[in-house]
């Protein structure tokens, strides 16, 4: 009798895509590490404010795309549901913006984050 052992390891999360605004293309694809996940969650939970702007047209920096097959629950009560998809808009010397798609029945929302954009950029961009 042939025995087959199934791996009980959780599937890997989808990779993180980094879009360079000036180049108008995805320039890097990186794994979602525990360290990066922790930094992003901390940034999202640090006193977010609803975005007051009318449009979102970045002129530089990067947009980082995260997908969560298992929706991400955040501790801050400003978020109505767990997050299924996230776009971080990161430009040096500008407050980061987060476009969040929720798991159930809520329209996407944009928040201004209090986190340091330069630090987040360094977290996602590979070393040169």
Image (cartoon, rainbow, N blue to C red):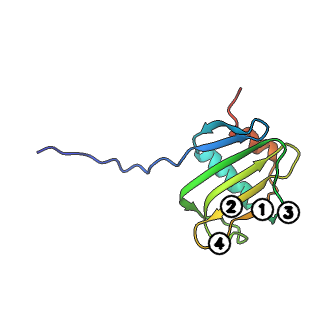
Question: In terms of image quadrants, where is residue 107?
Answer: bottom right
Looking at the image, the residue that sits furthest to the left is: 1
- For the residues marked 1 and 4, what is the alpha-carbon distance in whole angstroms? 14 Å
- For the residues marked 2 and 3, what is the alpha-carbon distance in whole angstroms? 16 Å
Residue on which disc 4 sits: 106
Residue 36 location (% of width, % of height): 64, 46
Q: Secondary structure at mark 1?
A: strand
Mark 2 vs mark 4: which is more N-terminal? 2
**Is residue 107 placed above or below 33 in the rendered structure?**
below
Residues marked 2 and 4 touching at CB (< 8 Å) = no
Q: Secondary structure at mark 3?
A: loop
Q: Secondary structure at mark 4?
A: loop
- For the residues marked 4 and 3, what is the alpha-carbon distance in whole angstroms? 19 Å
Residue at (57, 41) in percent of width and height:
31
In this view, the mark in front (1 or 4): 4
Classify residue 96 as left or right of residue 19.
right
Looking at the image, the residue that sits furthest to the right is: 93
Residue on which disc 1 sits: 111
Crowding around mark 4 (Cα neighbors within 10 Å: few <14, some 14 to 19, many 20+) is few
Mark 2 vs mark 1: which is more N-terminal? 2
The answer to which of 119 and 87 lies nearer the viewer is 87
Q: Secondary structure at mark 2?
A: strand
Residue at (68, 61) in percent of width and height:
100
Residues marked 3 and 1 touching at CB (< 8 Å) = no
Residue on which disc 2 sits: 100
Residues marked 2 and 1 touching at CB (< 8 Å) = yes
Classify residue 90 as left or right of residue 68.
right
Mark 3 vs mark 1: which is more N-terminal? 3
- For the residues marked 2 and 4, what is the alpha-carbon distance in whole angstroms? 10 Å
Crowding around mark 2 (Cα neighbors within 10 Å: few <14, some 14 to 19, many 20+) is many
- For the residues marked 3 and 1, what is the alpha-carbon distance in whole angstroms? 12 Å
**Is residue 90 placed above or below 97 in the rendered structure?**
above
């Amino acid at each position: 009798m042939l025995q087959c052992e199934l791996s009980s390891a959780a599937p890997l999360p989808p990779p993180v895509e980094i879009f360079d605004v000036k180049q108008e293309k995805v320039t890097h694809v990186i794994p979602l590490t525990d360290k990066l996940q922790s930094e992003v969650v901390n940034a999202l939970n640090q006193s977010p404010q609803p975005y007051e702007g009318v449009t979102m047209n970045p002129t530089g920096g990067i947009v980082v795309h995260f997908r969560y097959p298992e929706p991400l629950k955040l501790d801050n009560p400003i978020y109505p549901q767990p997050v299924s998809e996230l776009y971080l808009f990161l430009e040096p010397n500008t407050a980061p913006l987060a476009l969040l798609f929720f798991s159930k029945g809520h329209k996407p929302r944009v928040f201004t984050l209090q986190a340091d954009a330069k630090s987040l950029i360094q977290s996602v961009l590979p070393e040169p």
